[in-house]
Amino acid sequence: MSNQPFQQRKIIHVDMDCFYAAVEMRDNPELRDKAIAVGGSADRRGVIATCNYKAREFGVRSAMATARALRLCPDLVLVKGRMSVYQEVSRQIRAVFAEYTDKIEPLSLDEAYLDVSECPQFQGSATLIAKDIRRRILEEIGLTASAGIAPVKFLAKVASDLNKPNGQAVIPPAKVAEFVETLPLRKIPGVGKVTAAKLADLGMHTCADAQARSLEELVAHFGKFGGALYERCRGIDKRSVQASRTRKSIGVETTFASDLAGVVDAKQHFDRLLEQLEGRYQRCGNPVIARIGVKLKFEDFQQTTMEQKHAAIDAELLWSLLEGAWERGEGKAVRLIGLQVGLDKPGSAKQLDLGL
Ligand SMILES: [Mg+2]
């Protein structure tokens, strides 16, 4: 074990370039010059999982409704996803990572954090290690990857986007302070559209803007996330790469632009979240489900979760849990809904987690 302080680790975030679409183009040369999208069925209400760069030129994006994507790009070729192939390719990519470090934290099939602080190769140069990993993925697996290198996790993730596709960027420890100065807050992982809009309303656009606010002020506006924000805007991220962690849950959530008064208002959000949850569950490789549940955050930032033992993602059960959790608010409006599946073995016999 190293005793380096958390701020001086060498973290690489590797992110495959439009992964599913890239696998399809690799395996079917006829698709290479076409705009393609994976996952969206044209006939029913489908959404696109990934598209290639040619499709992106038309404005097509991940998670876009297929119908809209086809309006933007009428020649878009829809390709049925092959999840088992993506899972196998993902295993091959992780085998490459494992030759450099055993501290690998996958975020999804096509994305992972690597802590290479103790990797002896290339005299410990994380930049050269990242280059070599990308070279091997290209030569051995036939796909391009992008990478970000930084002393902390979230900056490595921000950096992997800077020279995408097929590129990499480094934020060395001495440059962190300067880099975050001008970094837009919406680029921080975890800052979604709603939070970004709220930050903008409060006059905060860049990390420098947020640095000027006190911890108390950020917590007052954003609850627990305010604490993370206080650190991130200074380039601080104390999370280590969680190598041995087996994933305990898969969840999706959404914060509303304006709070929802009643559970009937939640139906369409619920349907969309359910679809997202199913997608994410699949991308995690369909692991065995132990429990399913819901999370609500009320207008006063109080949070409640309700879950039940169940072996599948069950829309009806999730909706009834949502109704039950909603009642706990006793009339309070709801600002966030989350849906989740628990993957660990159920530890106790209790059916409902009643912790408010
Ligand atoms: Mg990716």
Image (tube, helix red, strand yellow):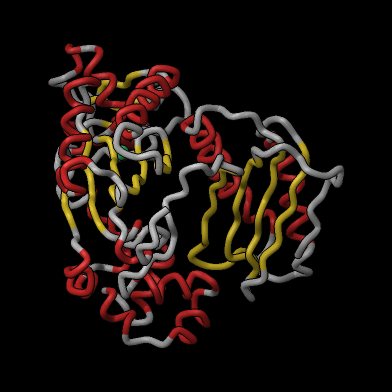
Find residue 59 and report its image quarter. top left
**In the image, is residue 118 above or below residue 84?**
below
User: Measured from the top left, where is residue 27 in percent x and y?
Assistant: 25, 13
Q: Residue at x 33, y 19 (%)?
A: 79
Numbered circles on residues, count: 0
User: Measured from the top left, where is residue 99 in percent x and y?
Assistant: 31, 32
Find residue 66 and report its image quarter. top left
Q: Nearer the viewer, residue 66 or 255?
A: 255
**In the image, is residue 303 above or below residue 29?**
below
Q: Nearer the viewer, residue 242 or 336?
A: 242
User: Measured from the top left, where is residue 38 in percent x and y?
Assistant: 34, 25
Q: Nearer the viewer, residue 242 or 167?
A: 242
Q: Outermost residue toward the right?
A: 349
User: Measured from the top left, where is residue 245 in percent x and y?
Assistant: 53, 44
Quadrant where the C terminus sits is: bottom right
Horizontal side of 122 relative to 195 (left or right) equals left
Q: Determine the quadrant in which ligand 1 lies.
A: top left
Horizontal side of 258 relative to 146 (left or right) equals right
Q: Residue at x 15, y 48 (%)?
A: 163
Q: Residue at x 65, y 68 (%)?
A: 298
Horizontal side of 248 relative to 29 (left or right) equals right
